[in-house]
Amino acid sequence: MQKINCKRCVYYFVTWQPQNPHGCKAFGFKSKSIPSNEVLKNSGKACTFYKQK
């Protein structure tokens, strides 16, 4: 499985909130870790919305 780099995705954004600095517009959430890691951890599958900038 190829590791997804969210920072190269069109849906990734920086929230500037110290407690949740990473966000994903496709899934609509903010998190402490990189969104693709959260998606993999919670669903068991790689992110399906990844789209390179």
Image (cartoon, helix red, strand yellow):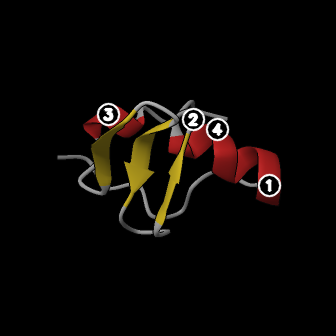
Q: CA distance from mark 4 to mark 3?
A: 12 Å
Mark 3 vs 2, N-terminal side: 3
Q: Which residue is mark 4?
A: 37
Q: Which mark is residue 32?
A: 2
In-front residue for pair 2/27: 27
Work out whether mark 3 precedes mark 1 in sequence or the reverse, and give the earlier one. 3
Can you identify the residue that label 3 sits on? 7
Q: Residues within 10 Å of mark 2 (few under 14, many from 20)?
A: few
Outermost left residue: 53
The number of numbered badges drawn on the structure is 4
Q: Which residue is mark 1?
A: 42
Please name the residue shown 30% across and 57% down the image.
11
Looking at the picture, tell me which residue is in the foreground, 25 or 19. 19
> What is the CA distance from the residue labelled 4 to the residue labelled 1?
9 Å
Disc 4 marks a residue whose amino acid type is Asn
Residue kind at label 3, given as amino acid type: Lys
Mark with earlier residue (1, 2): 2
Q: Are marks 4 and 3 in contact (CB under 8 Å)?
A: no
Viewed as shown, does residue 26 lie left or right of 33? left
Image quarter of residue 14? top left
Asked whether residue 41 is in view, the answer is yes
- Name the amino acid type tagged 1: Asn
Q: Is residue 51 above or below residue 9?
A: below
Quarter of image, res 43: bottom right
**Camera-nearest label, 3 or 2:** 2
Q: CA distance from mark 3 to mark 2?
A: 14 Å
Q: Position of residue 49 (x, y in %)?
A: 45, 64
Position in image of residue 24 (x %, y %)? 41, 56
Image quadrant in which you'd find residue 2: top right
- Alpha carbons under labels 3 and 1: distance apart: 20 Å
Q: Nearer the viewer, mark 1 or mark 2?
A: 2
